[in-house]
């Protein structure tokens, strides 16, 4: 499964939008997060089209931010 498809399946559980606070993140916003390295799966950054190695042990959103860092284990 490609990285983007995997993240989109988790959409209700991922952090809210940074562009429109209080709403779910849009697909294009999630693409930008992946491209900028704001999402880490199993301690690795990845590209949108890269295949994900399963099982997923950790998923980190915004690893460099003290306020927005979200870890799903």
Image: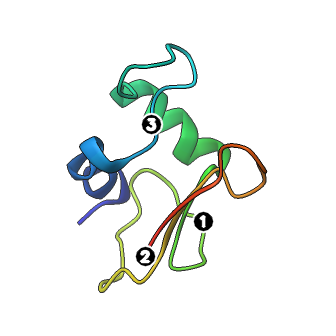
Instruction: Tell me whether the residue at label 2 lies in contact with that at label 1, contact meaning CB atoms closer than 8 angstroms.
Output: no
Q: Residue at x 40, y 28 (%)?
A: 25
Q: Is residue 41 above or below residue 14?
A: below
Foreground mark, 2 or 1, reads 2
- Going from N to C along the chain, the mark reached first, 2 or 3, is 3
Q: Is residue 19 above or below residue 53?
A: above
Residue 35 x/y as whole percent: 58, 43
Q: In the picture, which quadrant includes the C terminus?
A: bottom left
Extreme residue toward the top, this view: 20
Q: Secondary structure at mark 1?
A: loop
Residue 19 x/y as whole percent: 56, 16
Q: Residue at x 30, y 60 (%)?
A: 2
Asked whether, in this view, residue 72 is left or right of residue 10, the answer is right
Instruction: Tell me whether the residue at label 3 lies in contact with that at label 1, contact meaning CB atoms closer than 8 angstroms.
Output: no
- Going from N to C along the chain, the mark reached first, 2 or 1, is 1
Q: Secondary structure at mark 3?
A: helix
How is the protein colored in the picture?
rainbow
Q: Which residue is mark 2?
A: 73
Q: Residue at x 36, y 81 (%)?
A: 53
Residue 15 x/y as whole percent: 46, 41
Residue 30 badge:
3
Q: Is residue 54 above or below residue 67?
A: below
Q: CA distance from mark 2 to mark 1?
A: 16 Å
- Going from N to C along the chain, the mark reached first, 3 or 1, is 3
Q: Is residue 28 above or below residue 13?
A: above
Residue 63 badge:
none
Q: Residue at x 41, y 84 (%)?
A: 57
Q: CA distance from mark 3 to mark 1?
A: 14 Å
Q: Which residue is mark 1?
A: 45
Q: Secondary structure at mark 2?
A: loop
Foreground of the two, 57 or 27: 57
Asked whether, in this view, residue 20 is left or right of residue 8, the answer is right
């Amino acid at each position: 499964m490609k990285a983007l498809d995997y993240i989109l399946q988790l959409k209700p559980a991922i952090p809210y939008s940074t562009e429109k606070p209080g709403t779910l993140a849009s697909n294009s916003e999630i693409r930008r997060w992946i491209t900028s390295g704001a999402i880490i799966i199993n301690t690795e950054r990845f590209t949108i089209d890269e295949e994900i190695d399963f099982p997923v042990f950790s998923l980190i959103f915004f690893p460099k931010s003290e306020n927005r860092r979200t870890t799903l284990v």
